[in-house]
Image: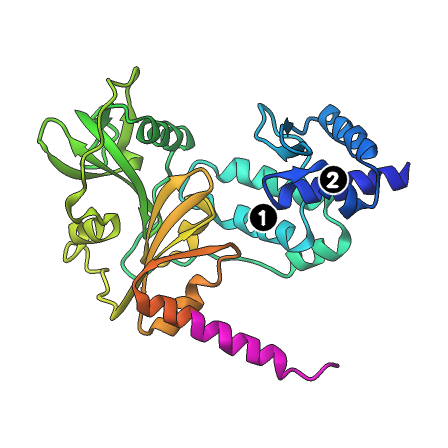
Amino acid sequence: MHKTSSRLLALLSLLQTRRDWSGEDLAERLDITPRTVRRDIDRLRELGYPIMAFKGPSGGYRLDAGTQLPPLLFDDDQAVALALALQTAATGTALAEDAARALATIQQVMPPRLRHRMDTMRITSVHPPGIGEAPQVDAQVLTDLSTAIHTHEELRFDYAADGTATAGQRRRAEPHHLVTRHGRWYLLAWDLDREDWRTFRVDRIRPRTPTGPRFTPRELPDGDVAAFVMSRFRGLDGTTTEWPCRGEVVLNLPATAVAPFAQDGIVEELGTDRCRLTLGSWSWTGLAATIGRFDTDIEVIGPPELNDAFAHLATRYVNAVRNTTPS
């Protein structure tokens, strides 16, 4: 039984590493027969894992998204990274209580060696000078706005422009992007009544239902979300820094996981698990090193100087490993 359980975990781990696997490849990697692979796939399905079969020369399998969350498998580094994200990613949102419960659940099942690593990590959120505590944002509002953005549906909402608890002004807008800046969430949208681009603080938005008709997305001025948002704030709050080096990357992480560590950068949601980060620094090498803190694949959008900085750091790190004397 122990051998079967270990094999199932190994199979699940392989299915999580890439999208498609042929039955023959899985059998070879696990040193079992294709028939045993099929049997183990059925066992994982019974446990709730949505494993889809696809046709091909030899057939294959992929781990798909399901309607409920099955048991998940993480290696040590992933488990610690997830726990750290839960400590920080919900800052400034109404997710704090849910995040705390999820963190407690993960810590409860962590082996002692990982729990000890977590016990040594205590995170304190420090706000930039002149920036107060970030207002709480309702998780459902974020979800509703994100859905409207991806389905291209008009939004109707009440907006308390002065931050008061009143019903606020009724607004109609075509939502385009959710971004974060200094811990605050903003909606970038085309205001239908004022016929102009506007940025709305998400904590002041109260969506109305139902949403409006679908629309064809407009082109943002200059096509650059980060530059547009920064231009709206420049000189208004005294917190904008004109960095000599500014770059743009896409990270395979949700915006909520990146925002707490983005400093004064702009985080743009691209989907449930992807976001665009625009960040500045005093040097290209420093910028590349800062972005490299995120434990995920990095797609450099530009400029070329940032590409060169990543290549320079890669060479430096390889040399560091090569020159390390084995203990």
Residue type pointed to by label 1: Leu
Task: Tell which residue pokes out farthest to the front in this image.
Answer: 57
Q: Is residue 76 above or below residue 142?
A: below
For mark 1, give the secondary structure: helix
Q: Distance from label 1 to label 2 (Cα)? A: 33 Å
Numbered range of the magenta stretch: 311-327
Q: Nearer the viewer, residue 201 or 28?
A: 28
Image coordinates for residue 207, horizontal then vertical, percent: 29, 24
Above/below status of 279 relative to 19: below
Judging by the rendered image, the residue that carries numbered circle 2 is 24
- Where's the C terminus, which quadrant? bottom right
Q: Residue furthest left?
A: 194
Residue 249 found in image quarter: bottom left
**Residue 176 location, quadrant:** top left
Residue 34 vs residue 147, the one in the foreground: 34
Q: Residue at x 71, y 39 (%)?
A: 12
Whether 326 is among the magenta residues is: yes
> Residue sitting at 77 percent across and 30 percent down?
38
Residue 55 % position (x, y): 62, 28
Label 1 crowd (10 A; few <14 / some 14-19 / many >=20): some
Element on which disc 2 rests: helix
State if disc 2 and disc 1 touch (CB < 8 Å): no
Residue 188, located in which quarter of the rendered image?
Answer: top left
Residue 260: where, in percent of width, then height?
42, 52
In the visual, does 128 lie left or right of 114? Answer: left
Q: Nearer the viewer, mark 1 or mark 2?
A: 2
Label 2: how many Cα within 10 Å (few below 14, some 14–19, many 20+)? some
Q: Residue 146 at x, y = what percent?
A: 36, 32
Q: Which mark is residue 82?
A: 1
Which of disc 2 and disc 1 is earlier in sequence?
2
Q: Quadrant of the N terminus?
A: top right
Q: Main secondary structure of the magenta part?
A: helix
